[in-house]
Amino acid sequence: MEQQFVQQARQAYTSRGLPFDDQQACEAVGAMRARMAALTGNVAALQMLANPATAQALQGAMPTAPAAPGMTTGAVQAPVPQAPSLTETALAAQIAALPHSDQGVTFQRFRDGFAVNGQRYVDPAGTIVAYGFDARSASYTDVVATSPTSFTIKTSRALAGATPITIATAVSNGAFWNVTTATGQQLSGQHVIPISVGFVVVRGNVGFRYVPGQGITNIAPPAGYRIARFQNGDIGATGYLLLERDPASEPPPNSLGGLFSDVKSIGATLGMTKAPADYALMRIDDAHLVPIDIPMDGKEVMVMRDCKRRNAVVNICRQANSYDSLYEPDGSKNPGHYFWRINWFESDGHPIMITEEDGVATLAMTDLASGRRIVLFHRAMGISDYSVQQEANGQVDVDAQWMFTHHALHDVAAMLDQAPAGSGSSPASVSTVAPASAPARLSVAAPGSAPASAPARNSSVPSGGHA
């Protein structure tokens, strides 16, 4: 393989009238070896290429090219031909060789990274700017910033002895991403969303899912929808992806339709009216939709600028700017953002969604496969706070708080097998909805205290967005 590589390099040099001596050949082979080691992480392959017998045979097979008239050997800095790409089969084999565990782990999400079983995880190569993970398999994929414009995408398992495997590299100017997988495939788009194994690249209203060993799958949302930038669910295990209504399909803000939309959004926030289905979970394999009736307006926060103090409690500001953010300007979570309000998991054999409904009055669970829905908690005066956590064994626990008291339900997915399909009292009343034709109001908020454990979710960059 090295002889063929050197022969190709010599031909490239000769066609340009440039010299290619033994020293240049050795340097080119060394660069090729380093690149292959960085891409594959395969120690056995590296040892084979470093075999002295191979190097000796390579040097003996290379005649010295005569120098071009008027040129010296070291005067030219020509690009070295790139090594062959890693195959999908080989990359999948590396990931399959990572340590396994039947116990799983617990992930905890932070603004600037995540923790595994309570211990913070950091990458010495750079800052983790985005990540996705699965508690049951301990698999995770993260995006690491190695420079202001360069990124490495790695997959591993959060277990002892597991070394992260580079599955792609990326270059971004902040507005657009160019991604190259370790197998040589090219993707480009505005956002990169890591999932437990692989990632999704979003471009306009379409997307491309890359899974090592399986390649690229196109994702085409139905008309009027686009892929939501923030995903707080287990895409890999459930096969569901969150969609957001395309603003281009909405009435202009100054039109009568826009005014009517604003009124409905306010009513939905207060739990008095049904908002349009601004969000939906889509099953990637067959584009099956589960509408989620929460308004888009809650995702934005407002920042006041050019303010002057009028008195001890009042400031007069000349500008007010709003933007999409998971966090408030003071660093606290933006509870109205859809990222905190929509969670989905694979638990006890069920793809489930945990949501908040009727403003802040109801917490509900929906079986995405059957459409069955269970009211977990309901309080007319509102639920003050709550958390949703998936344990290492895959069970999902929900803890609701009001009147300074915690009300916990463990392994909520088990209720789908225990409770009859029918109406009942709260908590844990059961009903059946048709996911594709009779949308229910579905949403979820996040705890306001310490960051809640959130396995099998796709998290955000420190500024409040995905890569």
Image (cartoon, rainbow, N blue to C red):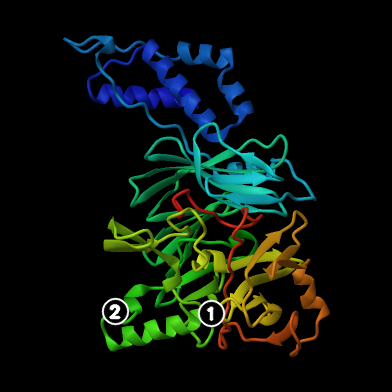
Residue 43 falls in which quadrant of the image? top right
Q: Residue at the spot x=72%, y=45% of the render?
A: 117
Relative to residue 289, is residue 65 depicted above or below?
above
Residue with the mark numbered 1: 291
Residue 245, position as x, y percentages in the image: 42, 75
In the image, is 386 to the left or to the right of 22? right
Label 1 amino acid?
Answer: Pro
Relative to residue 49, is residue 119 depicted above or below?
below
Residue 355 falls in which quadrant of the image? bottom right
Residue 214, position as x, y percentages in the image: 57, 54
Residue 321, position as x, y percentages in the image: 31, 62
In the image, is 317 to the left or to the right of 282? left
Q: CA distance from mark 2 to mark 1?
A: 23 Å
Label 1: few (<14), some (14–19) or many (≥20) C-alpha neighbours in 10 Å: many
Q: Residue at the spot x=75%, y=80% of the render?
A: 428
Tell me the tag on residue 253: 2
- What element does badge 2 sit on? loop
- What element does badge 1 sit on? strand
Label 2 amino acid?
Answer: Pro
In the image, is 164 to the left or to the right of 85? right
- Front residue of 284/362: it is 362
Instruction: Mark 2 or mark 1: name the one nearer the start of the chain.
Output: 2
Q: Residue furthest front?
A: 311
- Foreground tag (2 vs 1): 2
- Front residue of 62/240: it is 240
